[in-house]
Amino acid sequence: MSNSVLHFSVQTLSPIHIGSGRELQGNYEYLYFPSHKKIALIDESKVLGILGEAHINQWLSIIDKGESLLALLKDRSRELAPVDIAQRIIEVGEKALGTEGNIREQFHDGMGYPLLPGSSLKGGIRTAFVTQKILGEYGAPKKMSREKLGFFKKNNPQKFQWKDNGLENDFLAKGVSKGTEPNHDLFRLLRPGDIRFSHTEVFRLITLNKHHDGWKDDTKISTLIEVIPPQQEGYLRLLNPKETLINYLKREKCKFSFPLSPTEMEWKHLSYLVNKHSQRRLEEELAFWEAEASSSLTISYKEALMELHQKSQHLKEGACMLQIGFGSGINGITGGWQKTAMDPRDYQGWVSSFRKSAPQLAFPKTRKVSPTGYPLGYIVLKPLDCKNVSAFKSEWEQRRKKKLTEHSQGMVPQKILPQYPLKSKKIKRGMLLDAFVFKKQEQPKRKRIHVYVKKGKEIQVDIPYPSDAILGKIIEVEVIEIKDGKVSQVKFKRIKTQNR
């Protein structure tokens, strides 16, 4: 079997959420640290190490009563940081205030990386492919008959049922007696790998909902959601043995409603279809909003749509934009071809099956957006030259390590150390030096400090400072007098907060 292996960089253009199916409960499965702007998924062994086994019952009692576990932990460890109790850290996204409630968890792999599964990517490509075929890549849009759709029950024409075997059979494996099966599917051997990213964020999802008096943020159905944030990059390995697949399907006597050849499954052609699909959906969404009254809630959303559409028009050959995952809406899930390709009466029946009330309102009448107004789920795939794959992976790993370092900054209290000035630096008036406050003097209110001038030339002097707050601290002092080439007098400048 001759395999065609392709390599891509995958960049997130908007927040991505592929759910694990789990909702994280606040104060039980996660704790929010407002001062750090981090969320820590609780590691029970770490919490137990702080509280001690003797306080297990107190821990359980706090959870039962809905009291603050964080307050109890800070009583036991006053310099508590997220990393001290976390199995995993989540950043708090922009405008994500109000982090009470459950969080919809992002899917992760066994190593703890946020993951975009290859199956989700493949599903998005399939949807785009079938939609473009229905909407007439080779001519006028096809009108979908009820028989082909299988959306309406024969014994009750008004009763809608979701059943797309007719479509799958026609566009992905026509001629198979039992309909589409895994072994008789045009995408059978298209195998995208999983895509790993470095970190996640949490924000409160905005749900734009159409009411009789306009679009509003429906806080009743708002939720906290963990996402792979925009501007992250991952690596994709795609197996596409197109010729082997086409020959196999021909031997199985599969027929299709369009010319079938190896070029049909070439990535050049697939990426073209996927990108045209994304452009069409963005254009239809923009056209929809042209007829809608603008508000402060919708302006940023429309601007985001225009930005995404512009980016889709400037992609090089082999690159494509695609929307996947949670928040893409019914048109994202199904392809959004129904209004064009279905009989108007059938389309209304299809819409009515989703909306039992207010059928006169626009369909769909809700949009899931980020706090900055972006639709969810947009990514862009860009081909990598085989020669550049190793370098790309190495750079990605360096960025991941850098991000992990950034995560740790501000979470673990930095141990402030006294440091000598560089050997090349000449000690002179106005220079700042490190000092350690080790003793409280009597009258007047002064403190004895140890000044780190040079190794072997440290000095001890007194400085006026009435408060005991600096006792045991590393401070910075300014040289104000030098006698016989030695520092003789300094004055307090500030408590040292970070190492050089």
Image (cartoon, rainbow, N blue to C red):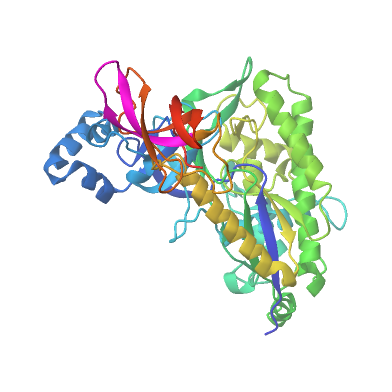
Q: Which picture quadrant has residue 251?
A: bottom right
Magenta segment main secondary structure: strand
- Left or right: 440 as drawn, with respect to 90: left
Q: Position of residue 325 (x, y in %)?
A: 58, 48
Residue 174 in sight here: no
**443 is within the stretch colored magenta:** yes
Decide which of 62, 414 is in the foreground and name it.
Answer: 414
Please determine whether, in this image, residue 423 is positioned above or below residue 71: below
Q: Position of residue 346 (x, y in %)?
A: 68, 41
The residue shown at (31%, 48%) is 43
- Left or right: 449 as drawn, with respect to 4: left
Decide which of 456, 408 is in the foreground and name it.
Answer: 456
Please determine whether, in this image, residue 231 is positioned above or below residue 460: below
* Quarter containing the N terminus: bottom right
The residue shown at (59%, 25%) is 209
Decide which of 490, 405 is in the foreground and name it.
Answer: 490
Q: Residue furthest left?
A: 54
- Left or right: 20 as drawn, with respect to 449: right
- Left or right: 485 as drawn, with respect to 254: left
Please determine whether, in this image, residue 150 is positioned above or below residue 295: below
Q: Which picture quadrant has residue 139?
A: bottom right
Q: Residue furthest front?
A: 484
Range drawn in magenta:
433-449
Q: Position of residue 496 (x, y in %)?
A: 44, 33
Please determine whether, in this image, residue 495 is positioned above or below residue 334: above
Q: Position of residue 12 (x, y in %)?
A: 65, 48
Residue 472 in sight here: yes
**287 is within the stretch colored magenta:** no
Q: Residue furthest bottom?
A: 1
